[in-house]
Structures are given as structure tokens and as C-alpha cells.
Image: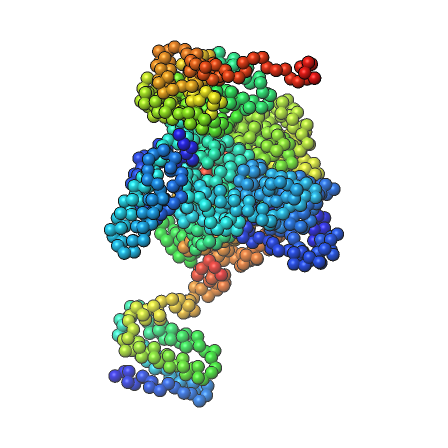
């Protein structure tokens, strides 16, 4: 039943940048509201918290924040909605979610954590790898 | 026209004349010069411009851009190679003249560093007014000779010789290791005919056992005798010979004898076919899948130039590079075969020793935090740092800076021991550079066995002794030399006698034009080292070994990090700091006497192999080996060279200096450099010669500035600094090939 | 006795190799080129052209009836191949009776001590005096010869090492010389080493029969020593007695280096050669030279037909003839 609400039969067609923006925000709201049911569906209780997933989604959206062409934004939105539908329809599996949205997101933790506030870029890079 | 320039450029002596043409791995033979000259195309124009070379002729540069050395510019003669006049010094052979003219003549038995044999006959060229083609490697070029290398006679000769060579050669290319870098393959493609006429049975030859390093498939041998000449002339061991006659000739040792010489691996490079190949490298890779990285060897203090061939993350083999000044074209067996130690016993995770004595892998964050915490809990005078044999200059600079910031100045390089005299560079370098050793006529070796300590220096001494019959006197325990020497004595007493002129050798020294005295770095650990050095300086003064134009007083260092350490000032402040230390930082130092460290000291080991240092360590920080980092090393003669990373680091290892920089930041005493260039500019303020890569910086002041010491010479005889040639540092100790060699090849 | 080329791996003492090989895939090759060479064996055989004809016939039929024909082909080829191998199995010309590398045996080991005898030491000094003192290595051949005579006809490794020490060179240089020359025997030979000349003039006069007679009589193969250690037979190059062909020479090692003789016995017949062997076995000393009682040295049987009178003086001397 959830898919009928969300599946977009016609790809969005925004007239201007503001319209695309508001559509993005709607999508974000939609996604965040479905997070608890996702965690419930995939038993991610012990793995991740709601706020973490929220920040993950936010960072994904923020990754494309530099785009100004409404058509491109529409396309990205379409893709995002498609992905959200897949997740909610349980077309994905637990390990997909963990791999794509949970693991490897230390940047978020580091942004949140306090012990790494004052370290230099050198040390940050040093902890990741030898080649920088 | 271009040749006038060439002739007038009497440049540095005999640099790489026959550079990569001697390197059997080059495919230079395939890129022959164009044989159709404009003269043939435009005969009228050529006839017009007769008196001087026509401007239409393509400019001919010597082969591989090599430089021609005219020892006596008046003695230059002119010969014509393929119609092109070229000026060459007198005494050159026809083959060398053709090389100056840029024409590469195929050869198998000729090698620029060995005597001329002339038995392969592949170098036949046509010389005008000669009834038959001449062997250009043996024929001296006479003035006005007209040499023709591309005529039908020369080509037919080459095809014929190639046909003969291939007659008894087995069809082993698919299983032969030399495929892809084989002289026979290359030259038969370039100069051979497309078919043979041999239909009989080919002969085969029994394989000989030459040891764990050289694999022999003697059926492939084309009897060029390069290995025989190499063994007699360069390596000094007369083991190989040509036995039998005719097509049944075999190269062998007759009796089953292993090649124990430390230069035995070089016959692998010299052999033009796959008869002598590298046993550890057998069937491992083809040469075209390997990526070659030109870097420096660090297993001894010579800094031989090598090329590391790697395939992906693995080092497959090590090949020498040409460097006329240091190692010519040879490398020692240790250098060549230590690479499989890079794959064993590697440290790849930071580890902390738990309460039960076992190591637990932790993250870098935690390891550095622990070390920084302990570093702040001890008093500055209880902090000691020891740099290892294989440490590069950047990491030693970082270590010294870090420990200085913590308040301690007790840093030194492990092989230097308590050697304090880092003030005068001439006191710890080989002041006669390695290439200038060829000018010497008397050698005095004090407490050093160059054959095991620095095999390339030994090769150079042997070259001198062979060429000029130089005298060699040796003071030390009885040792094996591959040249004639006089064993003068075993201890400092002989030194005193020579200094006072009472010994028979003193007269030889004083009559010498260019005497050379080589003191071994194994003497750094003796109590009476000051007395020994002053005795040696007295000998040098009486023999006039130290003059403005010649400095014959040398110290032969033992490991790659020593010279840079002393240049950077890594000298301990107090003598017995190790016994009273509470925090010991071992940066790759495995040969420190770990018994001296007190039981309650906190030891941090930063290195790449789990060698002896790890047993005592409390924290292990994995670092990069020489093949994985870009580091600056200074060799025993003061020439700065840099290694280049050939393979990626193992596991979670980091570069040495980066670890110390990160540690300093975690410890709160952040070092001011973040990048390699930054740390190099820091080195520039301390020892700017370490930035002039590939340049030798001679010492400015001689040791006569040193104050005299009043120490007494002890009567203890000199010992050997290196017991086992094949196992001297952490890489070679971890290597299986080196273990096999030390089991089989060491003289018992 | 034919001139065989380079030695094969199969000749050398290795673990027994299986001589069987599967059907050869390209049998034609063995026929067309080797035909001329293999004919010298003197065996009666079908002319090779016929064989190759028959084979090419087979080859043509191949396309029709692969199975049956291939078997025939294979058998033919295999038998031919075996023939060729037999030819090669004849001992090649290894006169030095040994290999180009050393195999330890109880009486030939590098650590066995060996020295020149006291009398020979004097000879060594005398030999060395023929050469300049800084070129002692030129004396290697006479010294090796002396050592061989002293040791009963062959050179153990320790003798070569001793010679190397005397002339102050590395042992490998002496090994090189000893392996080069076939007259240096590096494995045991009999006290009387019989050498049969096998070159063309002697061959056409029947040296092969001489050798066969010797080998049959002594019951050994070439380069093998008889059980009592007295005789061994080898082939030798032309020794210059072509007028008195066939001939053998006896290298007499029974009396050490003092009594060493190298005598030619010419004009031998298979019967005479056996007699010589038996006389030698009893220890008698035969006069060397032609064994044909009718000849004087190289002269023809029945006396000279030329040189019957004093030679004419040269024209300038014959003053009467001007």
C-alpha cells in the first residue's frame, strides 16, 4: 500500500529552481518520516540510530547541493524516490542498507565527535592512509 | 659538424660509454640506425659536398648518448663508419668506434668491462681493403679505416653466425627465463635469417650445480665465455672454465664446486642467453610484466644503484643500474637476493603488548596515544632514541627533532655506537671516493674486511690491484681476499709499528704516490678508538696521504644510515644513557644490545620487520621498508641518493617520518613540517648536502684539525665486524634465500 | 668407424632413460634428409628412396583411411627412429674416455693425496726450466703427461690439483687443458692402452676389423678396461703410418714413468694383433714397427723397387755434365 502513494508515475517537471528545491525538501521530509519503519523492517535497531540515518540521507542530498539545473534536480529526485521505494518495498536486503548507508560514514561521527576537533589535516590523513 | 662538438667535449672520465647497449635487457638492437643515407638518394649532391661531411647526413650521436673520453686530445684519429667520419681516441677498437658513430654492432662475447675474447664472431663487419670481415671487438681502429656495417658481406656474416649459434641451441624459449630479455632472441630477430638448415640432432649438456643463487641450464650455453672472464677478472674466483672442445664444450667447474663469491649473481646479468639465470626468480615472471623502479640499495653502505622490478604489490627481482662512480654495473649477492625478505615477517598493524605479554593489534589512534602518554611521564634524561641501520635521513631528522622537543638529546644510529666525532666529516667518510680508488697504488686496510662489509668497494680495490698491481696491506683477523694482499698483523700493535716506521710496510706507504688507508667502522665500538684513529692519522701524515689534491684517509661505514646520521648530528649526549633509560624509541634498530635496556623501560619499536627489536618492545609501530618509501640515504663516500617507492606499503604501515610527526602532534610537541618538501627544507638547515641528490659532497676540512688524543692503544686484536655476510640487517635476516646462502655458501 | 658429431645426453651416465617414444608426428622429416648419412654404415638396406616413396604413398592414402594407415605409419616411423637412435648410440668420439665434469669415485677424489715421485720431482724441475719463470703455466702439458705416466696411464683429479699447485695457477685452468686434449685420460685405462688408428687411410685398409678383433678378443667395449686391468682399447687419430696401414700403438704404462713407451705396431692383421696382445700379456717386449716380415720399414714387400742405387748428384755438382 505504501508504494501506491509514493511511486511517481510521471517524473517531476519543475518549472524553476525554487520549485525543485521545495520538491527536494518534500522528498527529504518523506524519507525521514519513513526511517522508523525502515529500521523496523530490516531489524536495524542495534546497528544504527534514527538520527544517524537522517544525517546520512542529509549528507547524500547535500552532496548534490551544487547543482542548479532544475531538470537535473528532477532527475536526481526521481532516482531518489525510486531508491526510497525500493527500500520500503523490501526490494533491498539488510546488508545492502548496512553497506550503503551505515558503514563508512565515520565522517559523520567525526563531525559529531569531540576528540578530533583540534587535530591537523596531517593527522587526520595519517589515520586514514599512508598516501596523502 | 656535430662531431666537432663531440671531439671538443672532453668530458668526465669514461662515463657510461656503452650504457644500455651492454644492458642485455635493452631492445636497442632493434632500433638500428637507418641504413639508407641521403648520399645514396642524392648522389650529385653528395659528390658536390665531398671535402666535408654533407649537411644532409643525419647527425650521428654516440650510442645511447654516451660521452666519449679523449685522454689525449692530440691523439685522436679519424675513421669512417658507413661513410660518416668520426673522431675517436687512439686505441679504440672498431666496435667502439662504431658505437661512437651511433651504430650498434651485435655481439655476444664482448663486454665493455671484461677482456676481449673474440670467439662469438657476431661482431663481424666489413673493412675496406680487408679480404675477410673482421671481428670488430678485437680489431684496433686505425686512422683512415673505412668501416662498413650494412653491406651484404656484413649482413651475410651475421646471418651465418646466428645460424651456427642456433644450431645447437635448444628450443627452450617458452620455458626459458631469459625470454623477453634475451640477447639471442633480439639479435636473431634483428640480424638473423628467417630459416635454418640444421636437421641433425642437437647436442645437450648436463646442468651444473653452482649454488642456490644461479640456475644453470647448460644446454642453452653458447660458449661466449663471459662468465669465465667475469669470474677470473672481476670476481677474482677462478671457478669456471671451458672444458672440452668443439661443439661438446661445456662451461663448468669440473669438480662440483659452488660459486661462493659475493659477486656471483652478476653472471646472471652477463650471460646473454638463458644458461645462467636467477634461481629464486626462476619461472616467476616475464620481464614485460614487471615495472622497473630505479632506486638505491640499503643493505650496505655503498648505496649501489638498483632497479626494483615489481609486479603489482610484490617485488619480483632486483637488477643493477649503471653508475660508474659507485657500483659500475655490478651488485653484490646480498643486494640482489634480499628482496624475498620483504615479504616475510612484516609488521602491518600497530600493536601494544598487553599485560599477559602478548601483542594486541590496535588502531593508530590508540597506539600513538599510549606512546605519547608514556613519553610525558618520564624525565627528559631518561628518554633515548636509536635510529636503525636502514633509516633514511628524513626519519632521523624527525626523530632527533622530536626527542629534542621532549628535552632529550640521546639519539644515535645503532651502528655508530658511541662514536662522537661528528664534527669533521672527513673523520667518518670515504674521502677518496669509490671511483678514485682506482688511482691508488698502495692500500692499507685497518680492521676492515671489504669483501663482506662493502662488496662493491672490494670490487673496485680488486680492479685497481689487477690493473696496476697495487700493494695491499691488511691488519686484522685472517680473512679471505680475492686479490693478493700482505697480512701485516692482527691488532693495534702493528698499527703502532707502521706509524713509527718500524714495519716493513711503512716504506711501501711512504714511497707511494697515492696511498689509501681504509679504516673499518667496526672499530667505532672499541674503547681505544681515539688512539687508533690518531695512530692512523699519524700514518697518513707520514705517508703524505692527505694532500690538497688527494685525501687517502678513509673510513668504510657498515650500514646505509650511518653517514646521514652523523651528518645530521645524531650523536648521544651521555655515554651510558641506554642503561638508565625509561623510554626507548627504537626506529628500526635491531642490532642494539637489547640486554642493556633496563627491565622496566618502555620500549617503542618502529620498523618494518618483526626482528629482534620486537621481542623487547612494548609498542610496535609498523613502518615502510626501503622499497616502499621515498627516503634520502648517504653512502659511505658522502654521495646522497634517494630511494623511490616501488611497491605500496604493507597493511597499515606508514612512512617513518610521518609516524614521528603524527606522534609529535599527539604528544603535544608538534613538529613544524607536514610534507616531504617541508622536512627536506628542515634538513637543509642542518645538512644541506643531503638535498643535493646524486652528488658527492667531499669533506671540507681534514682530520688534522682534531686535537690529539692521549689514549693508549689496547693490545686486543681487531675483530670482524660482520660475521655472516648474508645476514646483516632485518630484511636479510628474514629472507629465505639469504638463509640458504649462509647455510651453503659461507666458508666454514 | 665413423665420425660422430657432438655427444648426446644419452651417452652420459645418467639414470636410465626410457628409449621409447610415441609415434612421431612428422615422420617424413627423418627420411628425406638423413638418407645419405645413414647409408655409410655399410649395412645392406633397401634404398632409402624406396622407403620414402612407400611412405609418401602412405601419406597420400592417409586422408582416406586414417586409423589403419596411421598405425602402419607409426610403426614404420618408430622402427626408423630406433634405427637412427642405434646409430647414435654407438659410442661417440670421446677419446679421453670421460666426461667434461668430474664424478667422485673411490680412487678418484679431490681429497686423495697425490704427489710426484722423488725421481719425477727432478724431471719436473727440469721441465720447468724450459720455460720462463713467470710463465710457469706453459709447462702444464708436459707436467700433466708426466703425471699421467706416473699414475699408470690416467689422471686423477688430485694429480691435476698437484700440477696446478706446482705451476701456480687455479686448478680449473689445468682442468681446462686436461679436458681439451683427448690423450689425457681422466678415467682408468689398462696397463697397456691399445690405440687403433681410425682415420681414412687405415680405415680403408681395414682398421675396423682390427678394432673388432681386439674388442672381441679382450671381451671389452671401447674405452673399457679388461678385468685384469691390463688392456684397454681406444681409437686414435692418424699417427702418420699411412704407408703401413693399418696400425695400432701401445701406450705402455706398466713400468711407471721411467718405463713408459709409446710404440707403433704397423701392418697388423686381426690375427697378428691378437698375437701381440697375448705377447704383451706375458710381459714380452716386442720390437715396434712393421709387423709384416716381408717389409723393411716403409718399403714395399719384396724389397725396394726404387732407390736401388746411389742418388744422382745435383746438376751443379756433376761437373762432368755441364
Q: How is the image coloured?
A: rainbow
| Residue B470 shown left or right of residue C191 in the figure | right
The spot of residue B138 in percent (x, y) is 60, 38
- The answer to whether residue B500 is above or below residue B273 is above
Can the viewer see residue C205?
Answer: yes
Asked which quadrant contains residue B49, the reply is bottom right
Q: Quadrant of the N terminus of chain C?
A: top left
Viewer-proximal residue among C99 and C244:
C244
Q: Quadrant of the C terminus of chain C?
A: top right
Viewer-proximal residue among C96 and B595:
C96
Report the residue at 46% width, 86% height from top: A17
What number of labels is visible?
0
| Residue C264 shown left or right of residue B507 in the figure | left
The spot of residue B659 in percent (x, y) is 48, 54
- The answer to whether residue C254 is above or below residue B699 is above
The spot of residue B685 in percent (x, y) is 62, 52
Viewer-proximal residue among A100 and C247:
C247
Report the residue at 63% width, 47% height from top: B148
Amino acid at each position: 500500500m505504501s508504494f501506491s502513494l509514493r511511486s511517481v508515475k510521471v517524473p517531476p517537471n519543475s518549472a524553476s529552481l525554487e520549485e525543485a528545491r521545495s520538491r527536494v525538501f518534500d522528498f527529504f521530509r518523506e524519507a525521514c518520516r519513513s526511517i522508523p519503519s525502515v529500521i523496523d523492517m530490516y531489524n536495524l535497531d542495534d546497528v544504527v540510530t534514527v538520527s544517524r540515518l537522517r544525517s546520512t540521507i542529509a549528507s547524500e542530498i547535500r552532496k548534490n547541493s551544487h547543482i542548479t539545473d532544475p531538470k537535473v534536480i528532477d532527475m536526481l529526485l526521481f532516482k531518489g524516490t525510486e531508491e526510497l521505494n525500493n527500500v520500503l518495498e523490501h526490494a533491498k536486503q539488510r546488508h545492502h542498507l548496512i553497506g550503503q548507508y551505515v558503514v563508512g560514514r565515520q565522517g559523520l561521527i567525526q563531525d559529531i565527535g569531540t576528540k578530533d576537533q583540534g587535530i591537523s589535516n596531517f593527522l587526520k590523513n595519517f589515520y586514514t592512509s599512508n598516501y596523502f | 659538424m656535430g662531431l666537432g662538438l663531440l671531439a671538443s667535449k672532453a668530458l668526465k672520465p669514461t662515463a657510461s660509454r656503452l650504457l644500455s647497449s651492454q644492458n642485455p635487457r635493452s631492445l636497442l638492437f632493434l632500433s638500428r640506425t637507418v641504413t639508407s643515407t641521403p648520399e645514396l638518394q642524392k648522389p650529385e649532391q653528395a659528390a658536390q659536398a665531398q671535402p666535408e661531411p654533407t649537411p644532409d647526413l643525419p647527425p650521428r650521436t654516440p650510442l645511447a648518448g654516451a660521452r666519449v673520453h679523449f685522454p689525449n686530445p692530440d691523439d685522436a684519429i679519424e675513421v669512417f663508419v658507413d661513410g660518416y667520419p668520426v673522431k675517436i681516441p687512439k686505441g679504440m677498437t672498431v666496435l667502439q668506434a662504431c658505437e661512437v658513430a651511433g651504430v650498434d654492432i651485435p655481439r655476444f662475447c664482448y663486454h665493455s668491462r671484461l677482456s676481449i675474447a673474440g670467439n662469438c664472431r657476431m661482431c663481424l663487419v666489413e673493412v675496406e681493403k680487408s679480404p675477410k670481415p673482421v671481428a670488430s671487438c678485437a680489431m684496433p681502429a686505425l686512422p683512415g679505416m673505412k668501416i662498413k656495417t650494412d653491406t651484404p658481406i656484413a649482413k651475410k656474416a651475421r646471418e651465418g653466425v646466428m645460424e651456427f649459434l642456433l644450431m645447437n641451441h635448444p628450443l627452450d624459449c617458452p620455458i626459458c627465463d631469459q625470454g623477453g630479455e634475451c640477447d639471442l632472441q633480439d639479435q636473431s630477430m634483428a640480424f638473423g635469417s628467417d630459416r635454418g638448415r640444421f636437421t641433425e640432432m642437437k647436442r645437450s649438456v648436463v646442468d651444473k650445480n653452482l649454488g642456490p643463487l644461479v640456475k644453470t641450464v647448460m644446454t642453452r650455453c653458447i660458449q661466449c665465455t663471459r662468465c669465465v672472464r667475469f669470474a677470473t677478472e672481476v670476481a677474482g674466483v677462478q671457478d669456471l672454465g671451458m672444458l672440452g672442445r668443439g661443439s661438446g664444450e661445456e662451461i663448468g667447474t669440473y669438480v662440483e664446486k659452488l660459486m661462493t663469491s659475493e659477486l656471483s649473481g652478476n653472471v646472471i646479468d652477463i650471460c646473454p642467453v638463458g644458461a645462467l639465470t636467477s634461481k629464486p626468480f626462476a619461472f616467476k615472471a616475464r620481464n614485460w610484466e614487471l615495472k622497473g623502479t630505479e632506486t638505491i640499495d640499503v643493505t650496505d653502505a655503498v648505496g649501489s644503484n638498483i632497479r626494483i622490478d615489481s609486479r603489482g604489490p610484490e617485488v619480483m627481482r632486483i637488477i643493477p643500474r649503471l653508475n660508474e662512480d659507485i657500483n659500475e654495473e655490478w651488485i653484490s649477492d646480498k643486494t640482489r637476493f634480499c628482496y624475498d625478505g620483504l615479504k616475510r615477517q612484516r609488521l602491518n598493524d600497530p600493536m601494544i603488548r598487553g599485560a599477559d605479554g602478548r601483542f594486541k593489534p590496535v588502531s593508530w589512534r590508540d597506539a600513538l596515544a599510549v606512546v605519547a602518554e608514556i613519553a610525558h611521564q618520564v624525565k627528559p634524561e631518561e628518554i633515548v632514541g636509536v635510529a636503525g641501520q636502514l633509516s633514511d635521513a628524513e626519519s632521523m631528522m624527525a626523530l632527533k627533532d622530536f626527542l629534542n622537543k621532549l628535552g632529550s638529546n640521546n639519539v644515535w644510529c645503532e651502528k655508530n655506537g658511541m662514536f662522537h666525532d661528528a664534527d669533521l666529516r672527513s673523520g667518518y667518510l670515504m674521502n677518496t671516493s669509490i671511483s678514485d680508488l682506482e688511482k691508488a697504488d698502495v692500500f692499507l686496510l685497518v680492521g676492515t674486511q671489504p669483501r663482506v662489509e662493502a662488496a662493491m668497494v672490494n670490487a673496485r680495490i680488486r680492479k685497481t690491484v689487477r690493473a696496476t698491481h697495487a700493494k695491499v696491506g691488511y691488519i686484522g683477523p685472517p680473512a679471505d681476499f680475492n686479490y693478493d694482499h700482505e697480512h701485516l698483523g692482527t691488532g693495534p700493535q702493528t698499527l703502532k709499528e707502521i706509524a713509527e716506521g718500524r714495519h716493513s710496510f711503512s716504506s711501501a706507504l711512504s714511497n707511494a704516490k697515492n696511498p689509501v688507508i681504509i679504516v673499518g667502522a667496526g672499530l667505532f665500538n672499541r674503547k681505544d678508538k681515539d688512539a687508533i684513529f690518531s695512530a692512523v692519522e699519524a700514518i697518513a701524515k707520514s705517508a703524505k696521504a692527505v694532500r690538497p689534491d688527494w685525501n687517502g684517509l678513509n673510513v668504510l661505514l657498515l650500514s646505509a644510515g650511518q653517514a646521514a646520521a652523523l651528518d645530521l648530528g645524531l650523536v648521544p649526549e651521555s655515554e651510558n644513557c641506554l642503561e638508565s633509560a625509561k623510554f626507548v624509541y627504537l626506529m628500526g634498530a635491531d642490532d642494539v644490545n637489547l640486554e642493556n635496556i633496563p627491565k622496566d623501560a618502555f620500549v617503542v619499536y618502529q620498523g618494518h620487520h618483526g626482528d629482534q627489536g620486537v621481542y623487547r618492545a612494548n609498542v610496535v609501530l609498523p613502518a615502510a621498508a626501503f622499497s616502499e618509501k621515498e627516503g634520502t640515504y648517504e653512502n659511505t663516500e658522502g654521495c646522497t641518493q634517494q630511494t623511490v617507492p616501488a611497491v605500496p606499503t604493507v597493511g597499515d604501515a606508514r612512512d617513518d617520518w610521518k609516524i614521528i610527526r603524527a606522534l609529535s602532534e599527539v604528544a603535544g610537541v608538534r613538529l613544524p613540517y607536514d610534507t616531504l618538501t617541508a622536512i627536506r627544507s628542515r634538513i637543509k638547515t642542518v645538512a644541506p648536502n643531503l638535498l643535493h641528490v646524486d652528488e658527492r659532497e667531499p669533506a671540507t676540512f681534514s682530520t688534522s684539525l682534531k686535537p690529539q688524543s692521549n689514549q693508549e692503544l689496547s693490545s686486543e686484536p681487531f675483530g670482524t665486524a660482520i660475521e655472516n655476510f648474508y645476514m646483516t640487517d632485518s630484511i636479510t635476516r628474514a629472507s629465505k634465500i639469504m638463509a640458504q646462502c649462509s647455510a651453503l655458501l659461507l666458508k666454514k | 668407424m665413423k665420425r660422430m658429431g657432438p655427444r648426446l645426453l644419452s651417452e652420459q651416465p645418467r639414470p636410465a632413460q626410457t628409449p621409447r617414444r610415441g609415434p612421431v608426428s612428422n615422420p617424413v622429416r627423418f627420411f628425406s634428409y638423413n638418407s645419405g648419412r645413414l647409408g655409410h654404415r655399410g649395412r645392406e638396406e633397401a634404398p632409402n628412396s624406396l622407403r620414402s616413396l612407400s611412405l609418401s604413398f602412405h601419406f597420400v592414402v592417409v586422408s582416406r583411411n586414417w586409423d589403419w594407415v596411421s598405425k602402419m605409419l607409426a610403426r614404420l616411423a618408430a622402427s626408423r627412429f630406433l634405427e637412427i637412435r642405434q646409430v647414435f648410440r654407438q659410442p661417440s668420439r670421446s677419446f679421453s674416455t670421460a666426461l667434461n665434469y668430474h664424478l667422485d669415485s673411490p680412487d678418484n677424489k679431490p681429497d686423495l693425496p697425490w704427489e710426484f715421485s722423488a725421481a719425477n720431482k727432478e724431471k719436473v724441475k727440469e721441465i720447468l726450466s724450459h720455460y720462463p719463470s713467470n710463465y710457469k703455466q706453459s709447462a702444464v702439458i708436459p707436467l700433466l703427461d708426466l703425471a699421467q705416466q706416473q699414475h699408470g696411464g690416467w689422471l686423477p683429479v688430485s694429480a691435476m690439483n698437484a700440477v696446478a699447485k706446482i705451476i701456480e695457477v687455479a686448478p680449473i685452468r689445468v682442468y681446462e687443458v686436461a679436458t681439451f686434449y683427448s690423450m689425457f685420460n681422466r678415467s682408468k685405462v689398462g696397463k697397456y692402452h691399445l690405440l687403433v688408428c681410425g682415420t681414412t687411410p687405415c680405415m680403408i685398409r681395414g682398421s675396423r676389423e682390427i678394432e673388432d678383433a681386439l674388442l672381441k678378443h679382450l671381451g671389452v667395449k671401447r674405452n673399457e678396461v679388461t678385468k685384469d686391468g691390463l688392456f684397454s682399447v681406444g681409437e686414435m687419430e692418424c699417427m702418420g703410418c699411412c704407408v703401413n696401414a693399418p696400425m695400432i700403438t701401445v701406450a705402455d704404462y706398466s713400468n711407471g714413468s721411467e718405463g713408459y713407451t709409446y710404440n707403433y705396431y704397423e701392418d697388423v692383421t686381426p690375427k697378428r694383433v691378437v698375437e701381440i696382445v697375448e705377447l704383451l700379456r706375458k710381459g714380452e717386449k716386442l720390437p715396434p714397427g712393421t709387423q709384416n716380415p716381408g717389409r723393411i720399414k716403409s718399403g714395399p714387400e719384396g724389397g725396394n723397387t726404387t732407390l736401388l742405387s746411389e742418388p744422382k748428384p745435383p746438376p751443379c755438382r756433376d761437373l762432368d755434365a755441364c
